[in-house]
Image (spheres, rainbow, N blue to C red):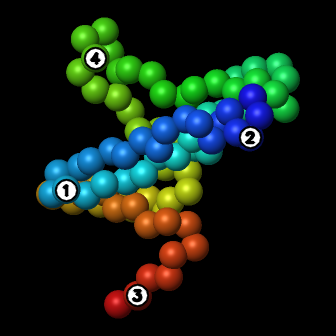
């Protein structure tokens, strides 16, 4: 695929509860590493698949989280936070 071919794929936005949206750009979900194909210079694989036979869900894995610092808060009410890599943040 050429750069213009890859650029023609859509930006995917995942909307979580409360209206929070996280962008999933083609540069994250189009993979060309050797784990996915033999010629990693021209061949790409879409790294999104459905989760389960009934399509009831999916797992947000490394391709979705790449480009973000992801914080998993496992204490109730169990939240997850996404900050773009390199984003400045305030420390308490």
Viewer-side label of 4, 2: 2
Name the residue at 17% across, 51% down: 17
First in residue order: circle 3 vs circle 2: 2
Q: CA distance from mark 1 to mark 4?
A: 22 Å
Tag 1 residue:
19
Q: Is residue 24 left or right of residue 40?
A: left
- The earlier-in-sequence mark between 1 and 4 is 1
Secondary structure type for disc 2: helix
* Between marks 3 and 4 in the image, the one whose residue lies nearer the viewer: 4
- SS class, disc 4: loop
Compared to 76, does 53 lie above or below?
Answer: above
User: Disc 4 versus disc 2: distance between alpha carbons?
Assistant: 31 Å
| Coordinates of residue 25 in the picture (x, y in percent) | 52, 46
Q: Which residue is label 4 attached to?
A: 55
Q: Are marks 1 and 4 in contact (CB under 8 Å)?
A: no
Residue position for label 3:
90
The reply to whether residue 35 is visible in this rendering is no
- What x and y, as percent, mark residue 88? 50, 82
Drawn side of residue 58 relative to residue 41, left or right: left
Comes first in the chain, label 3 or label 4: 4
Residue at (25% x, 58% y) in the render: 20
Q: Nearer the viewer, residue 75 or 70?
A: 70
What separation in Å lies between label 3 and label 2 (alpha carbons)?
A: 36 Å
Verify CB contact (< 8 Å) between mark 3 and mark 2: no
Q: Earlier in the sequence, mark 2 or mark 1?
A: 2
Residue tagged 2: 3
Which residue occupies the foreground of this view, 17 or 69?
17
Q: Nearer the viewer, residue 42 or 58?
A: 42
């Amino acid at each position: 695929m050429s750069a213009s071919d890859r650029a023609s794929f859509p930006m995917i936005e995942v909307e979580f509860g409360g209206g929070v949206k996280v962008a999933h750009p083609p540069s994250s979900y189009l993979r060309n590493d050797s784990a996915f194909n033999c010629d990693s210079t021209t061949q790409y694989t879409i790294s999104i698949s459905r989760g389960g036979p009934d399509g009831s869900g999916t797992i947000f894995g490394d391709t979705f989280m790449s480009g973000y610092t992801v914080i998993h808060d496992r204490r109730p009410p169990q939240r997850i936070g996404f900050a773009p890599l390199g984003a400045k943040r305030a420390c308490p």
